[in-house]
Every structure is written in C-alpha cells, then in structure tokens.
Amino acid sequence: MDYIKQKLIDVAIPKANKVRELVKEHGDKVIQEVTMGQVLTGMKGVVGLMTCTSKLDPEEGIRFRGYSIPELKEKLPKMHDDGEPLPEGVFYLMLTGEIPSDDDVKYISEQWALRAQGIPTHVYDVIEALPKDAHPMIQFNTAILAMSTESQFRKAYLVGMDKKDYWDPTYEGVMDLIARLPIIAAYIYRRVFHQGRHIQADPSLDWAGNLAHMMGHDSEELRRLMRLYMLIHSDHEGGNVSAHATHLVGSALSNPYYSFAAGMNGLAGPLHGMANQDVMHWLNKLKREIGSEDPSEEQIKAYAEDTIRKGRVIPGYGHAVLRKTDPRFQVQLDFANKYIPDAPYIKLVNRIYNVVPGVLTATGKVKNPWPNVDAISGSLLTSYGIAEYPIYTVLFGVSRALGVLTQLIWDRLYGLPIERPKSQNLQWFIDQVD
Ligand code: HAX
C-alpha cells in the first residue's frame, strides 16, 4: 500500500472516532449565537464547518496546519537552498499534519509525474470543441468535468463499499486530479495564447516547475516564482467560496472531479479568484485613461476615487475575514523587492498600496482597506513574462486544488454527512423582529 495511505489511516482513525464522540456525547452543546446580521451578510463569522488543512486569523493571516507562510518557507523542503518551498510539501503537510522530509516530497513529485500520464484523449477533444476565446476558466472547468469519466470513486461506490472506506478512492481521484491539472492548465494556455504549440511534460521536473516548463518558461527564476505561487494560493480555511463549494458538493458524495469543478466555478467569480485578472484589467485601464505608463500617486488616488464614485470595487483590496495586509500579498512583495525591484509593474503596485487603503478607508464602510493576495500576483507573473492575464485564475485554481481536495479526503475520513443548513423566507426574518 502507498505509505501515505497507511499514514493517513493511522492518523485519521482516532480523529474520526473523536468526531463521532463529539456528535454523540455533546451534540446538544450550544457553541455560538448567531445574529440576523451575520446570516444576511454572507454568514460571516458563523462557525458552520470543520476544516483541518488551514486556519485564517483576521489579524495574522493564514496558517497551514499551524504554520505561517514565513514558517513554511523555513521548514518545507526546497529544490535549492535559496529557492521557494515545493508545493508538494504543503500538500503533504495539509494531508498528514506533519512537515515532510525531502524523501516524502520526492515521493509525491514522482507519484504526480506518473499519474499525470493518464489523461484520456476525450478531455482534449472537449477543450478543442470550445471556441478559443472562451474564457480559460470555462475551458478549465469543462476539462475537469470531462476528466471525471476516470473517477475511481463512482466505480468503487457502484461496486459497493463500506462507508468508512470512502476516503480511499477519494484519495486516488484526488492524487490523479492534482497530478493532471498542470497539464490541463498549460494546454489551455498554449491553445489560447501560443497558437496551440504545446509542450510535453518533463517528468523529471517537480509539479510547479513542470507547469512553468509546459507553459513555455524554463528559467529557474520563473520556476521559483511558480513554486511560491502554488504554495501561497493552496488554501485559505474552509469558508471561502472555492473551498466551501468543493466541500458542499463533496458532501453529497459527488466524486472529486465534480466537487472540485464546483469550487472552480466559484473561483471564477470576480469577488474571489477572478480578482487576480481584474486587478490587471483595472491597472492597465488606469494607465490608459491617465495616459501614462508611470502614473503618480495623486493620479492613482484620483482614479481610485473615481472607481468608488462609479459604484465599482477596487480589485485586489478588501477581504471578508482579513483585517490587515494579507501575508500572501506581503510574501510576494518581498519576493518582488528582492528579485525585480525596478520592474515597472512592481513600482505601480507599491504606489497603489500607498494610496488605495486611504481611499477605501474614506468610504467609511470598507471593513478591510488592505491588499489581498490578488493585488500583486498578476503584476509578478507579468513582470516574469506571463502577461496573458485571463490565465491567472486558472493558475490560482491549480494551486487551490491542493487544499480543497486534501480537505475532501479528510471530510471522508471524518465521515462527515451531507450538508443541509436550514433556510427561511423574508417573512420569517421579519417575524423574528416583530
Ligand atoms: N472596493 C470597493 N468597495 C469595497 C471593496 C473594494 N475593494 N471592498 C469592500 N467594499 C465595499 C463592499 O462592496 C461593501 O459595499 P456595500 O455596503 O455598498 O455593499 C462594503 O465595502 C462592505 O464590504 P466588506 O464587509 O468590507 O467586504 P465583504 O466581506 O462584503 O467583501 C470582498 C469582501 C473581498 C468581496 C470585497 O472586499 C471586494 O469586493 N474586494 C474586491 C474584489 C477582490 O479583491 N476580491 C478578492 C478577495 C480575495 C480572494 O478571495 N481572492 O481570491
């Protein structure tokens, strides 16, 4: 047996027993009061999910199994001493709760390279049936669903299996899906932006390095950026739209492909992952309308105020949970300041950072005026030569698979049931007040 599976069984059985015990012995315990305001504003702060892969603190930002991003940079295995951690490592950490050894990470890299080889040809046919100008997220999500013909979960379910074994074919499907996503993402990128001149995978490369390679970028600098990108976008607790949608659909025992496609449909919204391309759209429009490649802070401030006046959002700023600058923004800014401090887009990002929080604070309603992960990720990619920004949300999605699909395995290890919150109509809410 795959040694990671054995490890999972050892770690998960006591925890799954604990979940059952909590429900049985303490099911009546009141853990939180919920206000009408919370329900009517997106259930912010309502504890309604159990997630083990990561935890988000409003002030401090994300921790993966207890480790902050700076701690991950220090502790996770790297390809080179001065490089970024390999995303394989954060996957292992989220899955098992332990920091992996170099060998663990190498094992996952090899597993994924092996599993990446089995994409059926109909998946490419389905992508090719879509117009080239269909948004890359449409192509990505369609391909994920097309790949679900390979789902081991559905086959095993039909044969018949014990509930406590659901996690096993889920694990197999998750490993296959994660292995194959970079190939699909690179295929769509080359199809849409490089006249369909595709580049074969190089199984000797790591998962993120291979993605950069298949997109057409073989410099060590770009591989390093891709590893960082894949690390920091991988998870953000359980309540964000992509994580929650994956979990919700998975709770109906939909296979990992259906579940993940649901999450990706959510990621494609402009208030979530699509914000990373909208930032570039906003920023390029700003330069065009101001008529300068190097706008001043005064000009940026006036443009941002105009965006607010027109009733639009400034993409890349604000957050539903965070109340400080997103550490995922900070780590990218540090990376940019270290390697490409003079890149025009990075200078622009810095100037925007100097003025936009003030503009948002002045509205008197924005709860978090600080930048989130999306405020800089596109400027970094553009500065390194991946300037075709409609692909950015796809890259985000490839990374997000690591967290949400790991959690799906854990949902099944815990034996979590189908999710079914209660809803009420408007009159019911009015009656509560009357
Ligand atoms: N620009 C303009 N207005 C903003 C704003 C922004 N960046 N952020 C919040 N607001 C507004 C809201 O639209 C809301 O206005 P109304 O009361 O008129 O409806 C008000 O401020 C209060 O909102 P909030 O409580 O501070 O924020 P929410 O929790 O409702 O929303 C969002 C959080 C991230 C959706 C929001 O900040 C936003 O729209 N930001 C811009 C889009 C963005 O960057 N999204 C990516 C977020 C991170 C992520 O998921 N990445 O994938």
Image (cartoon, rainbow, N blue to C red):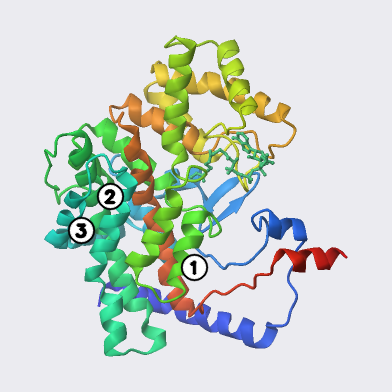
Q: Is mark 2 within 8 Å of ligand 1?
A: no
Query: What residue did someone put label 3 on?
Result: 110
Question: From the viewer's perspective, is the residue at label 2 or at label 1 nearer?
Answer: 2
| Left or right side of 149 for 286 | right
Query: Quick check: can you spot residue 429?
Result: yes
Q: Amino acid at mark 2?
A: Gln
Point out the tag, 3 or 2, that comes first from the N-terminus. 3
Q: Is the residue 128 above or below the residue 222 in the image? A: below
Callout 3 crowding tier (Cα within 10 Å): few <14, some 14–19, many ≥20: some
Query: What residue did someone put label 2 on?
Result: 139
Tally the numbered discs.
3
For the residue pair 430 and 48, the one nearer the viewer reads as 430
Q: Residue at x 16, y 54 (%)?
A: 124
Label pair 2/1, CB-CB below 8 angstroms: no
Q: Secondary structure at mark 2?
A: helix
Question: From the viewer's perspective, is the residue at label 1 or at label 3 nearer?
Answer: 1
Q: Amino acid at mark 3?
A: Glu
Q: Residue at x 62, y 47 (%)?
A: 320
Point out the tag, 1 or 3, that comes first from the N-terminus. 3
Give the quarter the ligand 1 occupies: top right
For the residue pair 312 and 25, the one nearer the viewer reads as 312
| Cα distance between the residues tagged 1 and 3 | 31 Å
| Left or right side of 398 for 426 | right
Residue 192, x across and y down, in percent: 22, 38
Query: Going by the picture, which residue comes out furthest to the front?
Result: 427
